[in-house]
Amino acid sequence: MSLITSNSLFQTAASGLEVQKKRLEAAAQNIANSRVSSAPGSIGYQIKSVSSKGPDDINFLNVFESQLEGASNLQNEINSSSNLGPTSEIVETAKYRYEYEPNHPDADENGMVQYPDVDMVGEMAAMVSANRLYEANLSVIEAAKQIMKRSLEI
Amino acid sequence: MDTGLSKLSTALSALVLRQNITASNIANIDTEGYTKRKVEFEKHLQEAKLNGNDADVKPSIEVTDQKVDLDTELIEMAETQMKVQFVTRMIRSQLELTKMGITGNPNSRL
């Protein structure tokens, strides 16, 4: 067993943790800013969501080869990525709803105020699911640690 | 003896690879376009055994078209854990047997 490959196991789980953390972050921001008003037509608070991309097939090949061929191609392992986790980024979408509040400082001539169209129920559900998936990734790390420990006991 | 140990080490490599792939499945559980991957090893071993040549069996990564299911992955992970425990215990007892052969002392432990 190559230690660097076990390292990639931790990297993979860490990427998983990162994505879930970002989802939680996005949900927190959306909920906190759900009542941020802006004048109609201007750019107010934009709804944040996480878009993630899976690993490249070459990474699977790297992990496979380094696992079975051991340390013989150590140089390749260092140069190429063997992280099997997703890469993610927070993207913003401008989606608004309008409320009739004629006395509001941000109201336009029709008395409408612009708010971000945050889906509260959806955000709460995203929060719970991000929590659970965060835990799942943590248990992957725990399992990886157990495997390394067992190997040290041989 | 030596082939036994090398087979066990291949098995351990295959199990760590499987843990890697399970980690990938769980990390990518809500990634669009990602489908479940799995490591085939026992199947290859069984086929090789039937053909009478199990000297050089290697695991393979297969891409399925199923969506990742968290419960299945967690169960697979627990199974991999148990198998790792089993294989490491087997390696240990192989080495103990070797040592017993060298020292002639049945009570010798590593």
Image: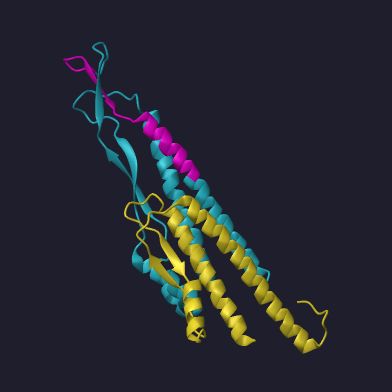
Chain A's colour is: cyan
Asked which quadrant contains residue B28, the reply is: bottom left
Which quadrant is home to the N terminus of chain A? bottom right
Is any atom of residue A1 visible in this view? Answer: no
**Residue at image x 80%, y 87%?**
B103
Residue found farthest to the front: B50
Query: Where does residue B15 sit, x and y in percent of width and height?
Result: 53, 68
Magenta-drawn stretch contains B16: no
Classify residue A82 by image quadrant: bottom left
- In-image side of B5 versus A80 (left or right): right
The answer to whether one can see residue B109 in this image is yes
**x and y percentages locating residue B6 in the rendered image:** 58, 82
Q: Residue furthest left?
A: A109
User: Which residue shows up at 64% across the image and 64% down it?
Assistant: A149
Position of residue A150 in the picture relative to residue A44 (left or right): right
Q: Which residue is at a point 48% across and 63% down the rendered structure image? A: B20
Q: Is residue A113 magenta?
A: yes
Choose top left, top right, bottom left or bottom right for residue A151.
bottom right
Q: Nearer the viewer, residue B5 or B48?
A: B48
- Counting from the top left corner in percent of width and height, residue A84 is at 42, 61
In the figure, what tint was chain B given? yellow
Image position of A154 with respect to A133: above or below: below
Visual colour scheme:
by chain
In the image, is residue A135 above or below residue B43?
above
* Residue at x 77%, y 84% (from the top left corner): B100
- Percent across and percent down for residue A57 are 35, 66
Magenta segment: A107-132
